């Protein structure tokens, strides 16, 4: 019996239990027949052949022995890799290509893939965008002005791919897909810094995509901060403690004022918060209209 664990399913063409055993009398009879064969007329040998040098009389015995050995050799048949082994050996690019081909042939599976796939982390998403940005910067020519038309045309395919990926990833971190505003703010902070690193082109027409990205990201900032502050008044304290006013001010400076609306809204909320805090602090028992109505009056009546 073969052990389980590494079984190829080897099959013998003739099991050992079914091979008939030869008794001694039958074997002796065959031996006698080989030694005492009937006389037959001699033939004339060729020039390069002698009476004792011919080996043709032994071929039938050799063939029978060879066939007998082959019949006892196990037969191993190949098979394709199981699906989990096939995926295991595939590269990331091959696996992506295979999944996209399957979805292209069967579009109804697209939503099922989205539902099954694990949620991407902010770190992994930013790593993808960072690698794309690094590829763009590394592709800029050294001997030519990096803001020239030649440099733009050279990296345009990679630049278009970056903007497309930036749009897709940004939308995936907005409500209602992402309900945690803090996660969204962290993502927006990182991708805004990525935009600052993209080249500014000498041809104003080539800067259109970057300016449009600034405008869309700025509107996203404003939407998320407004929703975050309106959700709870304590969230404004979080923005102050995390120094978001200074961060947005820096973004606006590097983008030629594209983030001014976000900065103005945040500062107006901070001013309102400070005014409310000042009023609440001034409103105390010392200057309250109820000052003087102590509990002693009620205590005197009880006496």
Image (cartoon, helix red, strand yellow):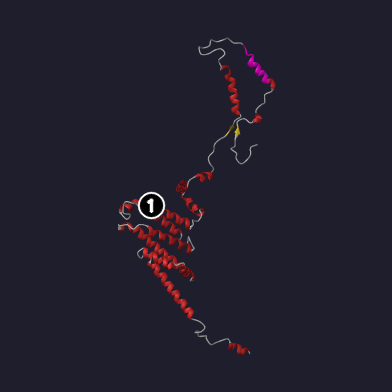
Can residue 267 be seen in this snapshot? yes
Image location (x, y in percent) of residue 281: 49, 79
Can residue 174 be seen in this snapshot? no
SS state under label 1: helix
**Quadrant holding the C terminus:** bottom right
Q: Is residue 186 above or below residue 105?
A: below
Residue reaching furthest front? Answer: 143
Residue 53 falls inside the magenta stretch = no
The picture quadrant where one finds residue 24 is top right
In this picture, residue 246 sits left or right of residue 116: left
Q: Is residue 257 above or below residue 8?
A: below
Number of callouts: 1
Query: In the rendered structure, which segment of residues is drawn in magenta?
Result: 26-38
- Say which of 161 and 117 sits in front: 161
- Say which of 172 and 114 sits in front: 172
Residue 37 falls inside the magenta stretch = yes
Give me the residue at 61% from left, 88% from top: 299
How dense is the environment of label 1, judged by Cα within 10 Å: few (below 14), some, or many (20 and up)? few
Image location (x, y in percent) of residue 13: 60, 31
Q: Is residue 240 above or below residue 135?
A: below
- What secondary structure predominates along the stretch shown in magenta? helix
Q: Which residue has dot 1 on it?
A: 138
**Quadrant holding the N terminus:** top right
Image location (x, y in percent) of residue 248: 41, 66
Image location (x, y in percent) of residue 236: 46, 70
- Say which of 256 and 12 sits in front: 256
């Amino acid at each position: 019996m073969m052990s389980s664990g590494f079984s190829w399913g080897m099959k013998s063409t003739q099991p050992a239990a079914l091979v008939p055993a030869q008794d001694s009398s039958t074997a002796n009879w065959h031996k006698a027949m080989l030694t005492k064969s009937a006389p037959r007329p001699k033939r004339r040998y060729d020039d390069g052949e002698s009476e004792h040098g011919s080996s043709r009389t032994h071929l039938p015995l050799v063939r029978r022995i060879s066939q007998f050995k082959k019949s006892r050799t196990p037969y191993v048949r190949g098979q394709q890799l199981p699906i989990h082994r096939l995926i295991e050996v595939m590269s990331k690019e091959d696996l992506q290509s295979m999944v996209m081909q399957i979805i292209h042939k069967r579009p109804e599976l697209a939503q099922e893939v989205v539902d099954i796939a694990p949620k991407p982390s902010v770190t992994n998403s930013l790593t993808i965008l960072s690698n794309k940005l690094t590829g763009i910067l590394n592709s800029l020519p050294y001997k030519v002005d990096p803001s020239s038309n030649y440099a733009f045309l050279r990296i345009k395919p990679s630049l278009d791919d970056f903007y497309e990926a930036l749009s897709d990833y940004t939308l995936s971190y907005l409500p209602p897909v992402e309900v945690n505003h803090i996660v969204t703010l962290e993502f927006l902070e990182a991708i805004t810094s990525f935009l600052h690193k993209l080249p500014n082109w000498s041809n104003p027409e080539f800067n259109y995509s970057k300016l449009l990205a600034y405008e869309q990201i700025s509107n996203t900032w404003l939407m998320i901060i407004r929703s975050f502050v309106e959700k709870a008044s304590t969230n404004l304290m979080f923005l102050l403690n995390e120094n978001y006013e200074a961060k947005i001010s820096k973004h606006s400076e590097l983008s030629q004022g594209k983030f001014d609306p976000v900065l103005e809204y945040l500062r107006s909320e901070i001013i309102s918060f400070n005014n409310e805090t000042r009023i609440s602090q001034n409103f105390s028992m010392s200057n309250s209209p109820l000052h003087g109505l102590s509990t002693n009056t009620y205590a005197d009546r009880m006496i």
